[in-house]
Amino acid sequence: MKPLTMPLLLTSFTRENKTEGDCACSSSSVDISLPIPVPQDDFLIPAGLIKLKLNDDFQVFLSPFGSKGASVLNMAAIEVLSDHRRQIAQPDLTSRLFSQGLLETEKDNHANDLCLHQPDTLTSWLHLTDRCNFRCSYCYLPHVREDMSVEVGRAAIESAFRSAILHNFKKIKFKYAGGEPLLQYPLIMELHSHARRMADENSLILEEVVLSNGSLLNAEIADAFKSQNIQLMISLDGLGDHHDIHRSYAGGRGSFADVSDAVELALQHGLVPSISVTVSSRTVEGLPSLLTWLVDRSLPFNLNFYRENDLSVSDEDMKLEEQKIITGILAAFRVLEKNLPTRSVLGSIVDRANLISPHTHTCDVGRNYLVFDQHGQIAKCQMQIHKPITDMTVNDPLAVLQTDQTGIQNLSVEEKQGCKTCEWKHWCAGGCPLATHRATGRYDVKSPNCNIYKALYPEALRLEGLRLLKYKNDPALVMKI
């Protein structure tokens, strides 16, 4: 007689997304260690539940109304999922299936599960300088020689705190950016001290990250960031020429050697940088070797698609050629499959999409995001920093941005033509609104990269399923029911 197989459900132990990028996307975490109580109702499998076969014994599931990432089930657990009598006989597993969003009742209100509630973090981009020692081919800045003063920086931080308090945020996050923000390293530390004092005085959780090209990093800076709990993001678009073709010094010299040395330096000082990778048709063929390099060093990373702007429009070879991008990224996925990272890949490997949890808006623009330029003017998005909506002198700048109807409009995916019936809409949310508007002149339509996304999402989910299987015996990484 064939031995009985016990039902098995695997999920990430935490739903935390630690990758950092240059976009307004939220990272969030929830405690998923306990299932939620099971209602006394008959259960249904929710409409839109996505499932993919991993092998003969396991499938991976993603719920459009869950909030706890992907789940891997063996065939015995799938039988419980599908059969009400088995659900009654397996109450612990049924509770977890319900908690994961793989089961629902007729009374469930999914609107509460789609990130429609007030976000808990207000994020502010501080443009410390327009100066930069690089001349990246996709940069949207003119690089005038202007810096943010200490007085403007402090006032900007105070302005952000006013909105955070008025809107009852629990956390406040500052992105120290530029240009190259390490050209303003003393200002970073001054503003950090001011933000730390204000966070303590107002009982807010403070998070800070420096968005850098890495070339000016030294041991003193790395130690300071580590000791002060300031995160570091470094842009790295490939190895060797695949990086240099995007990111060179102002004089034309390639920057890869210096940037890769900066990453190694940070690691030597216990500072783990998040790596932001911009993908274009120029560099996508180099992704497999780059991801090998990153995973070998256990570095968090995210892949961001190139976004055309007024200063890069003449670079035709960077535009996203659908098949070339799909082929290149799938090749990179095959590399990941051979050496799966310990952290979840669902929030980092397909542009702005965050497959960790369902949501209705692509990013935080116009909702809980402020962009301060070097003069204290406030825009909705850093790529529209030259189009400010208000300034730091108003009492509640966030309220002004939330009600603005003239700048970038970050609409719900439910308002976007071509998205409403898509099975991936609750994770993609229609793509970057600025990129869509530039390509179509509209905000209420699907992304021009839609075909790329649809080709990659199933493979990204499959990778996450394989990752959960790989680490199923590590209780620090995977929860096993």
Image (tube, rainbow, N blue to C red):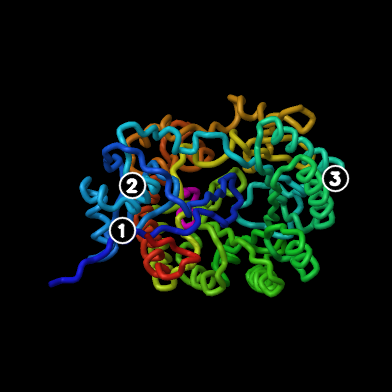
Residue on which disc 3 sits: 149
Between disc 2 and disc 3, whose residue precedes?
2
Instruction: Say which of 148 and 120 sits in front.
Output: 120
- Can I make out residue 472 in this image? yes
Residue in view at x 45 percent, y 55 percent: 346
Instruction: Label 1, secondary structure: give it.
Output: strand
Please tell me whether residue 161 is drawn above or below residue 76 in the rendered image.
Answer: above
**Distance Cα–Cα, label 2 vs label 1:** 11 Å
Type of residue at label 2? Leu
Left or right position of 248 against 277? right
Crowding at dot 2, Cα within 10 Å, few <14 / some 14-19 / many 20+, comes out as many
Type of residue at label 1? Leu
The residue sitting at the left extreme is: 1
CB-based contact (under 8 Å), mark 2 and mark 1: yes
Image quarter for residue 377? top right
Say the numbered circle drawn on residue 102: 2
Indicate yes or no whether the magenta region holds residue 353.
Answer: yes
Residue on which disc 1 sits: 73
- Can I make out residue 316 in this image? no
Left or right position of 232 against 366? right
**Distance Cα–Cα, label 2 vs label 3:** 52 Å
Residue in view at x 68 percent, y 54 percent: 209
